Image (cartoon, helix red, strand yellow):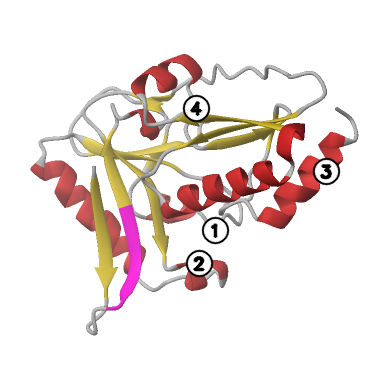
C-alpha cells in the first residue's frame, strides 16, 4: 500500500490518494498486474464545495502511474461514479486516459496489455435477529472516513443497548473478502446505507429508531 499527498509551496496538504495492488482485499476487484486507486480526493472543504480544475487530482494520478510503473505493473484501475459525484467522478478519470470496463464502475488505464479486471461479486446476505435492529458494518482502518464511521456506529449502537446488534467485519481480512466480497459497506436490517462520507450519528439514530418500530 502507498499513500501520496499533494502539498503546496507552504507545505499545506491539498489532496491525497491511496494506492494498493489489485490483489489486496480492499480493492473490491479481481485481476492482476494492476494498481488500484481506491480513494483520491482534495481536502474535504474543497470537496464539499465541489471545487474543480485545481490540477491537484491530475498530479496525484501522474504520481500513481509513476508508482505503478516503478513496481513493474501494467496499469491503473479505479472504481469511478457517474453524475455529480463528489467522490471519484468518472469524467475526471476519462479525461486522464482511463477507459470504462464494459458497463461497470471500473475504469482502467493500461500501458501494457493485460486482462481487464472485474468487480468482486458480493455474497453478503442479511441474517436477521428476532426483535433486534441489526447493523452489519464492513470496514478497514486504511481510511480516516471509514474509521470515523465505525466509531460513530459503535457509539450509536451502544446508545440503544440490547435493542441493537452490531456485527463488524474487517474488509481488509482476506478470509472476509473471500466470504462476503465486500469492501466498505454499512447495512441496517439488510438495507445498505451510504452517505458518501462518514455516517452522521444523527442519521444513524434516525434510521435505527425507524427500524426499531418495525422489528
Q: Which mark is residue 182?
A: 4
Report the residue that reaches farthest toward the right: 213
Give the image quarter of residue 171.
Answer: top left
Q: CA distance from mark 3 to mark 1?
A: 29 Å
* x then y, percent, for residue 47: 50, 67
Residue 212 shows in this picture: yes
The residue sitting at 31% across, 49% down in the picture is 18
177 or 67, which is in the foreground? 177
Residue depth check, mark 3 versus mark 2: number of the one nearer the observer:
3
Q: Which residue is mark 2?
A: 47
Q: CA distance from mark 3 to mark 2?
A: 31 Å
The N terminus sits in image quarter: top left
15 or 53, which is in the foreground? 15
The residue sitting at 31% across, 72% down in the picture is 13
- Tell me which numbered mark, 2 or 4, is placed earlier along the sequence: 2
Q: Which mark is residue 86?
A: 1
Q: What is the span of residues highlighted in magenta in the rendered image?
A: 12-17
Crowd tier of the residue under label 4, counting other residues whose Cα lies within 10 Å: few below 14, some 14–19, many 20 or above: many
Instruction: Inspect the magenta stretch and tell me whether residue 188 lies in it.
Output: no
* x then y, percent, for residue 77: 34, 38
- Tell me which numbered mark, 1 or 2, is placed earlier along the sequence: 2
- Tell me which numbered mark, 3 or 2, is placed earlier along the sequence: 2
Amino acid at each position: 500500500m502507498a499513500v501520496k499527498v499533494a502539498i503546496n509551496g507552504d507545505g499545506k496538504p491539498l489532496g491525497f490518494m491511496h494506492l494498493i495492488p489489485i490483489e489486496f482485499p480492499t480493492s473490491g476487484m479481481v485481476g492482476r498486474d494492476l494498481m488500484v486507486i481506491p480513494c483520491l480526493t482534495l481536502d474535504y472543504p474543497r470537496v464539499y464545495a465541489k471545487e474543480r480544475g485545481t490540477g491537484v487530482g491530475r498530479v496525484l494520478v501522474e504520481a500513481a502511474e509513476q508508482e505503478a510503473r516503478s513496481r513493474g505493473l501494467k496499469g491503473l484501475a479505479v472504481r469511478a461514479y457517474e453524475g455529480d459525484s463528489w467522490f471519484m467522478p468518472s469524467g475526471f478519470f476519462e479525461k486522464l486516459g482511463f477507459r470504462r470496463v464494459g458497463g461497470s464502475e471500473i475504469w482502467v488505464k493500461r500501458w501494457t496489455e493485460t486482462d481487464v479486471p472485474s468487480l468482486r461479486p458480493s455474497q453478503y446476505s442479511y441474517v436477521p435477529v428476532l426483535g433486534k435492529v441489526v447493523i452489519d458494518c464492513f470496514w478497514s482502518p486504511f481510511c480516516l472516513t471509514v474509521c470515523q464511521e465505525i466509531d460513530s456506529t459503535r457509539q450509536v449502537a451502544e446508545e440503544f443497548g440490547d435493542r441493537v446488534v452490531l456485527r463488524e467485519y474487517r474488509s481488509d481480512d482476506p478470509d472476509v473478502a473471500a466470504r462476503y466480497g465486500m469492501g466498505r459497506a454499512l447495512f441496517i436490517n439488510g438495507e445498505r446505507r451510504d452517505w458518501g462520507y462518514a455516517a452522521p450519528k444523527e442519521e444513524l439514530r434516525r434510521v435505527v429508531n425507524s427500524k426499531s418500530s418495525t422489528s
